[in-house]
Amino acid sequence: MARDRFGRMINYLRISLTDRCNLRCVYCMPVDMVFRPKAELLQDDELDRLMPLFAQQLGFYKFRLTGGEPTLRENIVSIVERMAHTPGVEEIAMTTNGILLGRLAEPLAIAGLRRVNVSIDSLDPDKFRRMTRWGDVADVWDGLKASTAAGLEIKLNAVVARGFNDQSDVVDLARLTYEFPWQVRFIEMMPFGEVAEFQQANTVGEAELLETIGRSLDQPILLHQGALDGEARLYQLPDAVGTLGFISSVTQPFCAACNRARLTADGRLRLCLLRDNEVDLLTPLRQGASDADLVALLEAAIWEKPWGHGLAEQEVPMRRVMSEIGG
Ligand code: SAM
Ligand code: SF4
């Protein structure tokens, strides 16, 4: 079991499968984003080598594939299949923009994927395009339909940016929970690297979003007395079949309950999303480190996981943008 020096059990790994993306969301990456050469990324066999170390030797059981856009990774279906067959792996989920799920949802579900978190910031085609710079929201709808047909559990993720999607869009997304049994989650924008200034100027908090939804639909009811479901605080609109989730990492951090680590696309273990501390696994892997060496490296890295982020002290992670880390 992997434990940090504060006594937190770390058993949830989010893996960025690629830094590449077929969109350029305004809050995530600059329009002229330069991606890493593929040779600098963790290869399939390197991932296959690390998975049993995490799942069997360190006690990680929950895995989320993300990116960049994870569906762009070559061999994504066979990667999921091998992960699902790794002893100790209990749950594989994916965070995706959904653009390619129309054709991938079914094979991924057959390979062992159980859940998808699909990012959709607006149902309005023009606003969706403005936020993603060129995305077509109809593709995401196709992906959602295919995911439903494939039996995948669905959550929606919407990052809210003032002046982009903080009014009618939030209301339209919340309204979906009357019809669909989904958790529609509103994510506070977090600051990273080159896009930090945009993010800090346009973040919208949970209280304001609740008020906007309450004014147009109904007052959402707090569920589970505010206890977090993963990272989200849950609410429900009266008579809705789905729920609303608020991920308020900036205004109401949940660092005390953090059980996660991140594997970046270029093979670094990142201990906190919002801090630049990372440990290089790719170099020792390529220099022939033994399993025992790698486990010792991972245990030492996890032990030193920072307590929490430093946004209140104006400490913003500067070395990477979100897509490289895996949100
Ligand atoms: N491309 C996939 C997607 O968009 O779902 C997976 C990677 S993306 C980096 C993972 C999640 O991070 C998405 O839900 C996205 O909306 C969110 N995200 C990106 N930049 C963010 C930011 N600055 N603050 C908060 N969430 C962000
Ligand atoms: Fe791509 Fe996801 Fe970042 Fe949007 S949030 S640019 S879809 S990685």
Image (tube, helix red, strand yellow):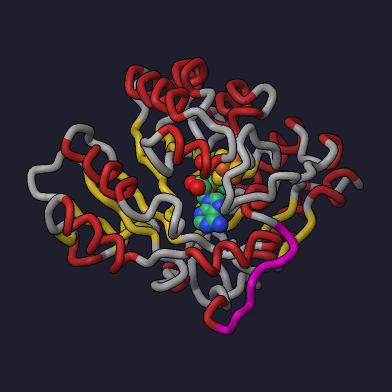
- On screen, residue 288 versus residue 14, left or right, reads right
User: Relative to 22, is 108 above or below?
Assistant: above
Q: What residue appears at the point 22 percent right and 33 percent down from the top-left corner?
A: 180
Q: Residue furthest left?
A: 239
Position of the N terminus by quadrant: bottom right
Quarter of image, res 208 = bottom left
Q: Nearer the viewer, residue 106 or 257?
A: 106
| Residue 109: x %, y % from top left | 44, 22
Q: What residue appears at the point 65 percent right and 52 percent down from the top-left corner?
A: 325
| Residue 262: x %, y % from top left | 61, 54
- On screen, residue 229 versus residue 126, left or right, reads left
Quarter of image, res 154 = top left
- On screen, residue 259 versus residue 169, left or right, reads right
User: Relative to 184, is 143 above or below?
Assistant: above
Q: Main secondary structure of the magenta part?
A: loop
Q: From this viewpoint, is residue 303 visible?
A: no
Magenta part of the protein: which range?
A: 313-320
All told, the count of numbered labels is: 0
| Residue 12: x %, y % from top left | 51, 52
Residue 111: within the magenta? no
